[in-house]
Each structure stands twice: as structure tokens, then as C-alpha cells.
Amino acid sequence: MVQVILALIVVVNGLFAYRFFSDYMKHRKETWAEPGNGVGLAIWGAVCFFLSTFGIPDFALSTIFYRLKKWCSDSNLPGTLNTECAIPVAVMALCYISAIEVDRTTLLLLIVSQMVGSYFGPRLVVKLPVRGIRLFVGFGLVAAAFFIIAGKFGVLPSGGSATGLTGGKLALGMALMMIYGALNNAGVGSYAPTMATIYALGLNPAVTFPVMMGACTFSVPIGAMEFVRLGRYSRKITLFTSIFGIAGVLVAVFIVKNLDTAMLLWIVAAVILVAAAQLLYTTLKTSAEKA
């Protein structure tokens, strides 16, 4: 089963890579005219996915960074967040799924559930007005900060020792993963809520990594291919982060291995909350002025 899952990761993400680079080759001139400094994007891709490997939400970090630098429009932000992380997350999944014990049936069903949600998500996101996207992203940032802070204060369950789910817990986990897959496509990262769900259902905390990375490495490219087809993403950002994000993941997995994120998580949570407040305030204020 492990070998089959690993092979499918390569196949699904290989298909995404083919779709993306085919789209890139058709739009090379437009790609290089897009906002964004190549060196800056390369450094950011490596740093962002280095931190993501240790559980720091890359969706939240990238949302803040791209809006600050004005390198991606809000309408293209959800698509970009999905397309840029597909390949680096696939590398994470290949490293973690074969190294951590988890019930294969549970892993497979949770992965499929998130894939289903991710498949239908882009069709809804592209129909949303920019205001709707900003609100989704803003509340997604708040949620990411909440899960980080809740974890620091021990509010979230600490998990159990189980490596698999059955019965009602499995059904609940599948339903929640389907929702997370859909929210991924609106720019709301699934790492933090997946982690909370794994803990709450009594699974071993170590199971978090193969589940959330396994689910993302299948669901994200499914949604990302839809964004590529619809042209609703930044090709330039995706190109650089796909390449240099891999380097960040490999450094984290094989060289650093362990990172003390205690203080870093507090800083990240504070930055996320400030960015969320600014985004939501601006969006709601603009809506009130138009009313």
C-alpha cells in the first residue's frame, strides 16, 4: 500500500507539473512580465517551504508576503497559493509517508475525502467576487493564528496513541477533510485544522504529518490543475517556488531535521493576526463606503 501511495504521489504531481509547464511555455512572455523579483521569489520559496516542513502554515506566510510586495492580485491569490505549493508538498509527503506508521485505510480515505473537496472548490472560488475572496483569506488567516496560539496554550487536545480511525470517528474525519479540501482553494490553508482534527480524534500526533501532507499532495494538485486551466494564478511565482521550494524542504528534512519553533510560532501568529486585521478592516471599510 505504501508503495502504491508513493507511486500515485509521483503520478498525480507529475501530471500537475506537466500541465503547469505546458501552460508556462504557452505564456512565457506574460509570465516574465508579471510582478515579482526572481531572486526574491527564489529565496522566499526556499525559506517558506523550509518553515512549512516544520508545520508553519505556508498559505498564511505567502498571503502576507505577496500582498505586502504586491506580487499577486487578490483575485489570483487562492490559485497561486495552491499551485506554488503542489511540488514542494509532494516532496514532503514522499519523505514523511514512508517514515511514520499510520493505518493505510485511514490514510487513504482521508486523502480521497480531501481530494473530493479540492476538485469542486475551484469551480466555486472563481465565481466569487474579489471581496468574497478577501474575506475568506482574512478569516483563514485568523483561523491559522488561532490554531497556533491554541496549541501554544494547550487548548487543543494533545492527541492519543492510535494510528487509525474506525466507525463514526472515521466518518467525521472524512467529512472534515472534504471541507478542508474545498477551503484550500479559497486560500484557507488546511495544515492547522487538519492537525487539530487529528489530535481531537485521538490519533498519535506524529500521524499528523503523513495525513496532512498526504492529503495535500493529492488534493492540492487536483485543485491547482483547475486554476491552471482557468488561468487564475501567478505563473511566475509558481515557477520559482516550485523549484526553490524543493530545496527548502530537502534542507529541512535531511540537514536541519529538528527546528525549535517555540518563539518563531509566537512571532508568526502575531504577524498573521496583524495582516488579517488589516485585510478584513480594509475589505469591510470599502464595502461600507460603497453601501
Image (cartoon, rainbow, N blue to C red):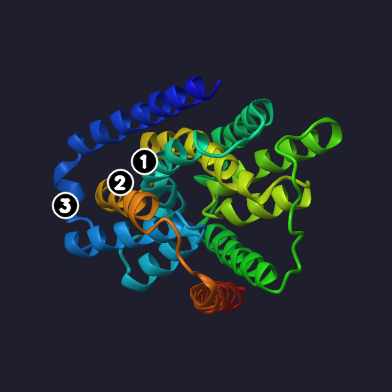
x and y percentages locating residue 174 in the rendered image = 72, 35
Is label 2 in contact with label 1 (beta carbons under 8 Å)? yes
Amino acid type indicated by mark 2: Ser
- Mark 2 residue element: helix
N-terminal-most mark, 3 or 2: 3
Q: Residue at x 61, y 31 (%)?
A: 116
Q: Residue 92 or 291: which is nearer the viewer?
A: 92
Residue labelled with disc 3:
32
Secondary-structure class at tag 1: helix
Q: Residue at x 38, y 68 (%)?
A: 65
- Spatial separation of the CA atoms under disc 2 and disc 1: 6 Å
Does residue 218 lie above or below 50 as drawn? above
Which residue is situated farthest in the left direction here? 29
| Disc 3 residue type (three-letter) | Trp
Of pointers 2 and 1, the one earlier in the residue sequence: 1
Tag 3 or tag 1, which sits nearer the N-term? 3
Q: Residue at x 18, y 35 (%)?
A: 25
Q: Are marks 3 and 2 in contact (CB under 8 Å)?
A: no
- Label 1 or label 3, whichever lies nearer to me, is 1
Residue 44 x %, y %: 30, 62
Q: CA distance from mark 3 to mark 2?
A: 16 Å
Q: Which numbered disc covers residue 180?
A: none
> What is the spatial separation of the Cα atoms under label 1 and label 3, in whole angstroms?
21 Å
> To which residue does mark 2 refer?
242
* For residue 156, above or below residue 263: above
Q: Amino acid at mark 1?
A: Ile
Left or right: 199 as drawn, with respect to 79 = right
Q: Residues within 10 Å of mark 3 (few under 14, many from 20)?
A: few
The numbered disc on residue 87 is 1
Taking depth in this image into account, of 52 and 140 the one nearest to the observer is 52
